Amino acid sequence: MWNLHQVLLFTVVTLNVIIKCVHVLEFCQKGESACQGPNVFPSPRMWTTSMLNLTHNLDHFRVSCEKFKGTFPLDHVRGNFIRTVKNCIFSQSSPTPLKGPLRLAAVSKDVLEGLLDLDIAVIGSDQFPQYVSGGKLFAGSEPLAHRYGGHQFGYWAGQLGDGRAHLLGHYTNRKGETWELQLKGSGKTPYSRSGDGRAVVRSSVREFLCSEAMYYLGVPTSRAASLVVSEEPVWRDRFYDGNVKMERGAVVLRLAKSWFRIGSLEVLSQSGELDLLRKLLNFVIAEHFPSIHSDQPDKYLAFYGTALNETAHLMAQWASLGFAHGVCNTDNFSLLSITLDYGPFGFMEAYDPDFVANASDEEGRYSVGAQAHAGLFNMEKLLQALGPLLSALQQEAAETVLKKFSGVYQSRLEQLFQAKLGLLGHSAQDQHLVHSLLQMMADTRADFTMTFRELSETSAENLRRGNLTQAWALQDLASHPRFSHWLHSYLLRLGRQTRDKDEDRQARMKSVNPRYVLRNWMAESAIRSAEKNDFSQVSLLHDILTQPFVTQAQAEQEGYAHKAPGWARGLKVSCSS
Ligand code: AMP
Ligand code: MG
């Protein structure tokens, strides 16, 4: 039986929920300027989370920029005009509000509630689209644009910086985690060079969906809280073929524990600003590498070793999912080894190490199979940036660390592929088993994601009998002349895992081999609807990709685990965004 206190609490919470639902629905009926896409509102199942302790009023949500402003000198010049900036890490820069009615195209409840302690009902406030697109600033926000440089496609590109992003500040949540909030597409800054400071709908939908999808795949990544679409005209030559078209501006509110990149250090090192280089590095270590002590004499070396190790692991994880980032320049590589700056990325379909996601990358520098090399190159550039802070001995030690990159990558990749095949322990032929499978996949162009998934979903008995009727990718693979031989070796290897039940093997494999990844055609289809202000597919994909390892009826209906539809042949994505 409930006591009076429990009854009262239940009544208050229920009323609270009902009032909020009504408020949200009323708001939706207000008309064009306030109307949001379908499926953005929390479904009843989403209301079960406790509403207690969450911030209900956006005006009470507070961020801070003190950590940055108190530590680093700021660019003393004000105004969003393009310039070369020296002797600072940030410039103060205000977002330029988007024009026209704003539509809230998508939100991540997990990010709002789980990372920002915001009650999901805040999305019903007519202020919300303003707050998350730069039209209104959260309390405490003093927006900053970060000065960084970078090596782009192998060459030093000089000053780059946040040309269309604004750091709003950081927020420490009730779990004690500190997240940095950044708007992307929020207007010009001193670093905009020839750009307009904007991001279009298609690239923003892709960033929103993929950063969240990667999180649920278990990959270290930035997160996305919301996506706002405007009526602001933005002109883009989507394929750099002279066909300039009007698109619309959009803004993603994204979060990371830190947005610092290799290029953040490079720009300081290249311009000889060594005191600032030391200051930034000390800050990054103190804030984000708790196992490294500030008075440790080899702390920069320890930082380098950790960054190298984690970057090698990240490259292996990308490879194990067939994910190609598309633009592995040093300005897009995080000092915390998280995936960031989603642009012309892609998940490969048919297995092909030469798969290039970015149509602008004509040489295939950043093909899926070349990413480890790009990671190594970027680690060389990180070492070059740290060079002025290292003694001769430390430099030598760091070079030895650098030489370990390929080994670290390789052994992590082997572990991941062993897990993808459900192999326990270690056997001498495991690598051969993996390599011959990949070779057959390359020869037959079998789908990378689904081959592994279907091996996970098919019982050993059905594999033995060649019963692959439900497995379209395995059917492609089975056309290979060496398939039966390979299958025989694989089943023998599984058979030697004497204490492993086949259901356990399947469950283990299903937990690492996703059934759904954000294939280009899926994103493109959602984008085409979003361009017409129908955000239901964005919302559906977002929802489905939060459980990429679980078979879901609606995803099956939509064909998300099937072969790409015919219309998707020849789809391309470029750097234009
Ligand atoms: P990305 O390829 O998006 O990583 O961008 C590379 C650099 O170009 C970064 O410094 C961006 O801030 C800048 N950039 C890209 N697009 C724009 C734009 N539309 N306006 C201003 N800067 C941009
Ligand atoms: Mg970038």
Image: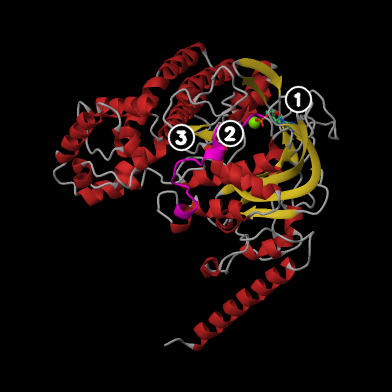
Magenta residues, as a range? 556-575
Q: Of the residues under marks 2 and 1, which one precedes in the sequence?
A: 1
Q: How is the image coloured?
A: secondary structure
Q: Quadrant of residue 185?
A: top right
Residue drawn 24% across the image and 44% down it: 467
Going by the numbered disc 2, the residue's amino acid type is Leu
Residue that carries the numbered disc 3 in the rendered image: 349
Badge number at residue 242 = 1
Dot in front, 2 or 3: 2
Of 271 and 485, nearer the camera is: 485
Q: Secondary structure at mark 1?
A: loop
Tag 2–tag 1 contact (CB < 8 Å): no
Whichever of callouts 2 and 3 sits on the residue coming sooner in the sequence is 3
> Dots 3 and 1: beta carbons under 8 Å?
no
Q: Quadrant of ligand 2?
A: top right
- Main SS of the magenta segment? loop
324 falls in the magenta region: no
The residue that disc 2 covers is: 571
Counting residues from the start of the chain, the first of labels 3 and 1 encountered is: 1
Secondary structure found at label 3: loop
Task: Name the residue located 64 percent from the left edge and 63 percent from the top edge.
Answer: 55
The image shows residue 557 at horizontal and vertical percentages of 47, 55
Tell me residue 544's x, y (percent): 50, 53
Q: Nearer the viewer, residue 413 or 141?
A: 413
Residue drawn at point x = 81 percent, y = 41 percent: 233
Which quadrant, please, contains the C terminus? top right
How far is mark 2 from mark 1, CA to CA?
18 Å
> Where residue 242 sits: x, y (%)?
76, 25
Horizontal placement of 234 versus 423: left or right? right
As measured in the structure, the alpha-carbon distance from the residue carrying label 3 to the one carrying label 1 is 29 Å
